[in-house]
Amino acid sequence: MSLPDRIVEDCLDAVAGGQKAMRQVVARWVSEPMALLAGLGEDAPIGLRTLHRSGELTVLDFVWAPDMTLPPHTHEVPALIGVYAGREDNIFWRRRDGGIEAAGAQTLGPREVATLGRDIIHSVTNPLGMRSRALHVYLGDFFAPPTPRREWDHGKLEEHDWTPDAVRQRFAEAEAREAAMRSQTD
């Protein structure tokens, strides 16, 4: 059985136990970063690769470009984030006076796991000049949750609908920036 299949099987076995059980699974997988990198492919393209998607569970392998940021957004399902290479900086936001304001932050490095409730609003940055990698596990359908996901632009923090296509576009743009930077140094 392939490593991605084993990860998914472990996650499916833990679904009934909720976030607590899933956190243990994600923590176990990211505790061996080099094995995870080798099994998921060190040269995986920038983006989010779906390892599993169903109404009860989504398992994604995130490959963050250097210096990449996603704006504030909701998930509308509980989530576990386990970093196994690089770093993710999260800013947590709260609704206030018809908008949002920063309410806290958390940095995740290799072997670290964050637990996010279904109502969390957060933005994510890879602050490093290298790729970062993380397992993202959602207790529901990441792409089509029961309540539509929301997003806020970085500049004016105006709220609008979140779409998977916009996220894919951001990753594609980040990959193009990384390729352009590499070509300048070659």
Image: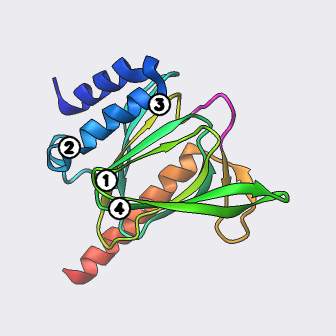
Q: Is residue 127 left or right of residue 185?
A: right
The secondary structure type at the circle numbered 1 is strand
Q: CA distance from mark 2 to mark 3?
A: 21 Å
Q: Who comes first in sequence, dot 4 or dot 3?
A: 3
Q: Is residue 143 visible?
A: yes
Q: Which amino acid does the dot numbered 4 rest on?
A: Arg
Q: Which amino acid does the dot numbered 1 rest on?
A: Arg
Q: Quadrant of the N terminus?
A: top left
Asked whether the residues under the numbered discs 2 and 1 touch, taking CB atoms below 8 Å apart as contact, a structural biologist would say yes
Q: Is residue 108 left or right of residue 6?
A: right
Q: Who comes first in sequence, dot 2 or dot 1?
A: 2
The secondary structure type at the circle numbered 2 is helix
Tell which tag, 4 or 3, sits nearer the viewer. Answer: 3
Tell which tag, 4 or 1, sits nearer the viewer. Answer: 4
Residue located at (35% from left, 68% from top)? 66
Q: CA distance from mark 3 to mark 1?
A: 21 Å
Q: Give the residue at mark 2.
A: 36
Residue density around tag 1, few if under 14, some if 14–19, many if 20 or more, within 10 Å: many
Q: Which amino acid does the dot numbered 2 rest on?
A: Leu
Q: Give the residue at mark 3.
A: 19
Tell which tag, 2 or 3, sits nearer the viewer. Answer: 3
Q: Who comes first in sequence, dot 3 or dot 1?
A: 3
Q: Give the residue at mark 1.
A: 133
Asked whether the residues under the numbered discs 3 and 1 touch, taking CB atoms below 8 Å apart as contact, a structural biologist would say no
Q: Which residues are magenta?
A: 144-149
Q: Position of residue 165 (x, y in %)?
A: 55, 47
Residue 41 part of the magenta segment: no
Q: Which amino acid does the dot numbered 3 rest on?
A: Gln
The secondary structure type at the circle numbered 4 is loop
Q: Who comes first in sequence, dot 4 or dot 1?
A: 4
Q: CA distance from mark 2 to mark 1?
A: 10 Å
